[in-house]
Image: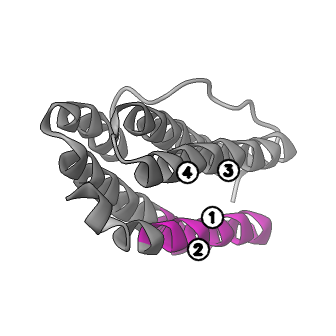
Amino acid sequence: MENDKVVSLLNDLLTKNYDAERGYKEAAEKIEHTSLRSYFESQAKNRYDFGHQIKALIAKYGGEPDKGTSIAGDLHRVWISIRDAFTNGDKAIYDECIRGEEAFSAEYGEMLTDEILPQDVKDLVRTQKDSVDKALASLRTMEVFAA
């Protein structure tokens, strides 16, 4: 696979992490339940850390990391809908975060099916997907806090 394509895929993933980080920060600011707030803050930090890991691979493959969040794309729309949920209370914010994580996990899964990705990229994507899946499972156990 050409380095340009690897860089493009990684930048796409980086942008989606920016979106998720921003969505979690906004959710943490708006949610009333302290356990959910702490969880959202932790996940925002997690996505920030993911971004730095991705940036290192982008540099390795000779690229420049994109700056900022996306303007279009499914995941961006999911995280934007979190903002819309703020007026509807904790349950709506919680539900949108679940939706966002499910979409994020699916994105990582799709990337893992690309058989021509270099092994180090696949390893990072797999590790981050596992983290997203664990976070999603953990978030699902907190539904009672959002009720």
**Of the numbered discs in the image, which one, if any, rests on residue 128?**
1
Query: Earlier along the polypeptide chain: callout 2 or callout 3?
Result: 3
Tell me which segment is drawn in magenta. 108-136
Disc 2 versus disc 4: nearer the observer: 4
Q: Amino acid at mark 1?
A: Gln
Q: Amino acid at mark 4?
A: Gln
Q: Verify CB contact (< 8 Å) between mark 2 and mark 3.
A: no
Q: What whole-number distance in Å separates the C-alpha atoms at marks 1 and 2?
A: 5 Å
Confirm or deny contact between disc 1 and disc 2 (CB under 8 A).
yes
Q: Establish if 23 lies above or below 66.
A: below
**Which quadrant of the figure has residue 48?**
top right
Structural distance between the alpha carbons of marks 1 and 3: 7 Å
Whichever of labels 1 and 4 marks the residue nearer the N terminus, that label is 4
Inspect this view and state whether residue 114 appears.
no
Cα separation, mark 2 vs mark 4, equals 14 Å
Q: Amino acid at mark 2?
A: Asp
Provide the residue designation for mark 4. Answer: 43
Q: Is residue 145 left or right of residue 11?
A: left
- Distance from disc 2 to disc 3, alpha carbons, whole Å, reads 12 Å
> Is residue 94 highlighted in magenta?
no
Between 77 and 88, the residue placed more toward the observer is 88
Callout 1: 10 Å neighbours few (<14), some, many (20+)?
A: some
Q: Is the stretch drawn in magenta largely helix, strand or loop? A: helix
Q: Which residue is mark 3?
A: 50
